[in-house]
Image (cartoon, helix red, strand yellow):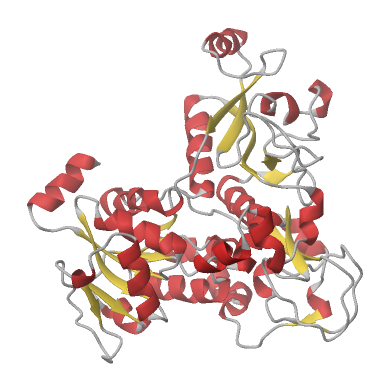
């Protein structure tokens, strides 16, 4: 890959990249793309261009290279590889000669629309927006295939890193029992509120505000919603499913994983194989687990060969007491900083760093407390619902509301605490692109 990128640099024909959404992830991706040989950050699109410029400068991109085009109705279709245009005009971005677009808005409704339009304009699409991916990713991937472009999850975020481990294991001849990630979780976090998120992350309220961190987003990391979304993305890429609705979220160190996330018949907690799961870096009393995997990802593998099991154990890989199950892991994920890998693979090899094949699972809304009729739901990370991972069949059979469709949805009846909210219990905004895309027979049959 690096030789191909060097060649593009040498012939002055770099990969031209556009970024949509310049928040925390987008800023990381922008900073790294800017520094990658063989590619250029050509366009950045954000509804607030001044905020985007501030974030880009803070990410180490010189301000003199940034060209604010928000005052213009259009920007040139031919991108300039010596400066970076910053615009609030998404149509101009679509009309430009970009090779790859990175969608990093974080809003499922906006992300679904942006990704759909980018693919329709026949540009490779790197989907940072996992919330949009779990809603309409399989539909968008089929559309991309029909347009001969790539739809890809972003390398560096957990879903694509888990997919890489999963792909490695199956391509090597191992069986994958479990795949997942670590996080900071306690059962009481399910009821967590955005206003309290800063405390659980160890910030003061002023530090949280000064860092411009989104309380709802960080609350979704704590209440299990973000983990459910990421595991849903993995499920849709691999065909894996949760062992139980909502997953287990057991406390575990790295060494504990191959003893816990295995079948019950062999001393673990699982009722089946080939499942996604999340482990916590906290014991149930709130104390921190030594040698935890808070920022990392893992897979549990096995093989029917006793010879290979012994080989694995001899190399010091953590296993269960029998040596039948072993864990492979990556201790950290670099979030937006590894996005150039996805950009390069899409352009150079027409290959995704993970793409959803089917809607295997769904992240559905569950009440954090008793909710009254006419109450507006707040969506991911809000005060009144959290997201739980279930199999798609379970969601369909029970007519459950996806978490990505519930922001500002109005309840038409009261619901109890911990109730899975049904589609017939809410009114959804009529102008919802993601909902329309999901319901479109034409797009589902692409």
Q: In the image, what residue occupies the spot 42% across and 71% down?
A: 21
Q: In the image, what residue occupies the spot 82% across and 65% down?
A: 368
Question: Is 225 rendered above or below residue 10?
Answer: below
Q: Is residue 276 left or right of residue 44?
A: right
Q: 337 or 410: which is nearer to us?
A: 337
Question: Is 341 rendered above or below residue 60?
Answer: above
Q: Is residue 60 left or right of residue 170?
A: left
Do we see residue 123 in this rendering? no
Q: 427 or 208: which is nearer to us?
A: 208
Question: Is 332 rendered above or below residue 339?
Answer: above
Q: Is residue 245 left or right of residue 414?
A: left
Residue 311 place in picture, x, y as percent: 54, 9
Residue 207 place in picture, x, y as percent: 55, 62
Q: In the image, what residue occupies the spot 63% across and 50% down?
A: 231
Q: Is residue 293 left or right of residue 285?
A: left
Image mark count: 0
Do we see residue 198 in this rendering? yes
Q: 234 or 39: which is nearer to us?
A: 39
Residue 218 place in picture, x, y as percent: 61, 61
Question: Is 291 rendered above or below residue 229?
Answer: above
Residue 79 place in picture, x, y as percent: 19, 73
Return the residue found at the far left: 11
Quadrant of residue 143 in the image?
bottom left
- Image quadrant occupied by the N terminus: top left
Q: In the image, what residue occupies the spot 82% across and 70% down?
A: 421
């Amino acid at each position: 890959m690096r030789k191909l990128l060097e060649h593009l640099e040498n012939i002055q024909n770099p990969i031209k990249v556009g970024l949509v959404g310049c928040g925390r992830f987008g800023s990381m991706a922008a900073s790294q793309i800017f520094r990658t040989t063989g590619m250029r950050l050509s366009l950045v699109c954000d509804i607030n261009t001044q905020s985007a410029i501030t974030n880009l400068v803070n990410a180490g991109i010189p301000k003199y290279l940034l060209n604010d085009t928000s005052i213009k109705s259009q920007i040139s279709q031919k991108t300039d590889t010596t400066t970076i245009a910053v615009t609030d005009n998404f149509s101009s971005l679509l009309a430009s000669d970009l090779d790859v677009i990175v969608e990093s808005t974080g809003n499922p409704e906006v992300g679904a629309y942006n990704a759909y339009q980018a693919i329709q304009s026949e540009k490779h699409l790197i989907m940072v927006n996992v919330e949009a991916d779990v809603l309409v990713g399989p539909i968008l991937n089929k559309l991309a295939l029909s347009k001969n472009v790539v739809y890809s999850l972003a390398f560096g975020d957990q879903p694509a890193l888990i997919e890489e481990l999963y792909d490695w294991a199956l391509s090597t001849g191992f069986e994958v029992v479990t795949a997942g990630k670590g996080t900071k979780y306690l059962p009481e976090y399910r009821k967590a509120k955005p206003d309290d998120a800063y405390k659980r992350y160890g910030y003061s309220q002023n530090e949280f505000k000064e860092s411009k961190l989104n309380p709802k987003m960080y609350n979704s990391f704590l209440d299990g919603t973000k983990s459910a979304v990421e595991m849903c993305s993995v499920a849709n890429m691999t065909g894996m499913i949760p062992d139980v609705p909502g997953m287990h979220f057991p406390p575990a160190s790295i060494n504990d994983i191959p003893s816990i996330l295995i079948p019950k018949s062999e001393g673990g907690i699982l009722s089946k194989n080939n499942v996604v799961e999340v482990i916590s870096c906290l014991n149930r009393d709130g104390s921190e687990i030594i040698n935890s995997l808070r920022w990392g990802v893992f897979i549990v593998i096995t093989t029917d060969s006793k010879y290979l099991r012994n080989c694995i154990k001899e190399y010091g890989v953590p296993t269960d007491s029998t040596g039948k199950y072993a864990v492979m892991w990556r201790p950290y994920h670099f979030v937006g900083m590894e996005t150039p890998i996805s950009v390069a693979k899409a352009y150079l090899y027409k290959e995704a760093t993970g793409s959803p094949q089917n809607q295997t699972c769904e992240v559905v809304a569950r009440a954090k407390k008793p909710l009254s009729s006419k109450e507006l739901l707040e969506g991911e990370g809000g005060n009144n619902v959290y997201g739980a991972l279930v199999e798609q069949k379970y969601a369909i059979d029970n007519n459950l509301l996806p978490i990505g469709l519930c922001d500002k949805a109005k309840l038409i009846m009261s619901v109890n605490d911990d109730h899975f909210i049904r589609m017939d219990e809410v009114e959804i905004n009529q102008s919802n692109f993601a909902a329309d895309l999901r319901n479109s027979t034409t797009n589902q049959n692409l």
